[in-house]
Image (tube, rainbow, N blue to C red):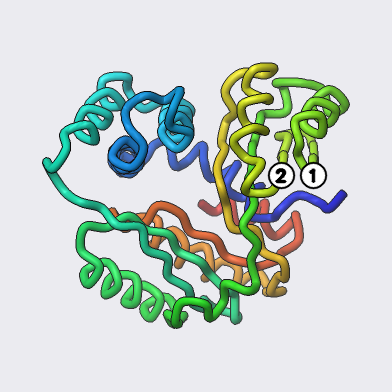
Amino acid sequence: MAGHSKWANIQHRKGKQDKKRAKVFSKLGREITVAVRLGGPDPDMNPRLRLAVSTARGQSMPKDGIERAIQKGAGAGEGENYEEIRYEGYGPGGVAIIVEALTDNKNRTASEVRSLFTKHGGNLGETGSVGFMFDRVGEVIYPAGKAGADDMFEAALEAGASNVESDEEMHEISCAPDDFASVQKALEEKFGEAERAGLVWRPNVSAEVDEAQAGSVLKLVDALEDSDDVQNVTPNFEVSDEVMEKLLAAG
């Protein structure tokens, strides 16, 4: 089995900091609203909504905030119409970066994303310019205390997962995109809601960077994540565990 995705580990650690951000609830609400408009307000019949609500709960989003987002999505023809956009570019050290956004104004979002890349030593490219360096996979994350490594491994493989990795902090389960819904459902029936789950971009090649370059990449990622329209940011850099610990400790 392949080792943990470096970015999965970083996200896991950053997630505890992200919970403190007021903006995260706005982004979660936007995803819930879009999920309702695309697939209806019933989580049992709408996998994307079920995932969005599960993620919101995992981030401690208030119940009334979740309900307002669902009601907003159910109000056909009311409010903003969001569009899913993917941006691709390079950050410091030649690190490839994929940015996923939900926007009601493509020109505004493209301008902001391009400006952030430029400001932080990168450059925004055309769609497809770095996409070949990533694979689309389903990912389910459980905290290590949810189950033993052997139990999680057996349950995940039985559910149809293609890869399972465990360490002292988390269990990372991967699967093909087409299998994601069934894998997630089977694991939730056995272990409850996951800490994080969804379709993600997983680097198939990694750019090796030094500590300074990695720090610059994380600053770019943080700036992009602070954008109201940006939902997810995935870079393909590779650093040692020691360097990663120093960068996360530095905030």
Q: In this view, does 1 lie above or below 121?
A: above
Q: What residue sits 53% from the left and 81% below the top?
A: 129
Residue kind at label 1, given as amino acid type = Asn
Please tell me how crowded label 1 is: few (under 14), some (14-19), or many (20+) other residues with Cα within 10 Å.
Answer: some
Are dots 2 and 1 in contact, CB under 8 Å?
yes
Please tell me how crowded label 2 is: few (under 14), some (14-19), or many (20+) other residues with Cα within 10 Å.
Answer: many
User: Left or right of 23: which side holds 167?
Assistant: right
Structural distance between the alpha carbons of marks 2 and 1: 5 Å
Residue at image mark 2: 174
Q: In this view, does 206 lie above or below 245?
A: below
Q: Is mark 1 on a helix, strand or loop?
A: strand
Q: Residue 228: x, y in percent?
A: 28, 54
Residue at image mark 1: 163
- Between residues 193 and 143, which one lies in front from this camera angle? 193
Q: Is residue 64 above or below residue 74?
A: above
Total marks shown come to 2
Q: What residue sits 88% from the left and 26% below the top?
A: 150
Q: Residue 248: x, y in percent?
A: 59, 51
The quarter holding residue 153 reads top right
User: Nearer the N terminus, badge 2 or badge 1?
Assistant: 1
The quarter holding residue 119 reads bottom left
Residue kind at label 2, given as amino acid type = Ser
Q: What residue sits 35% from the left and 57% below the top?
A: 84
- Between residues 128 and 96, which one lies in front from this camera angle? 128
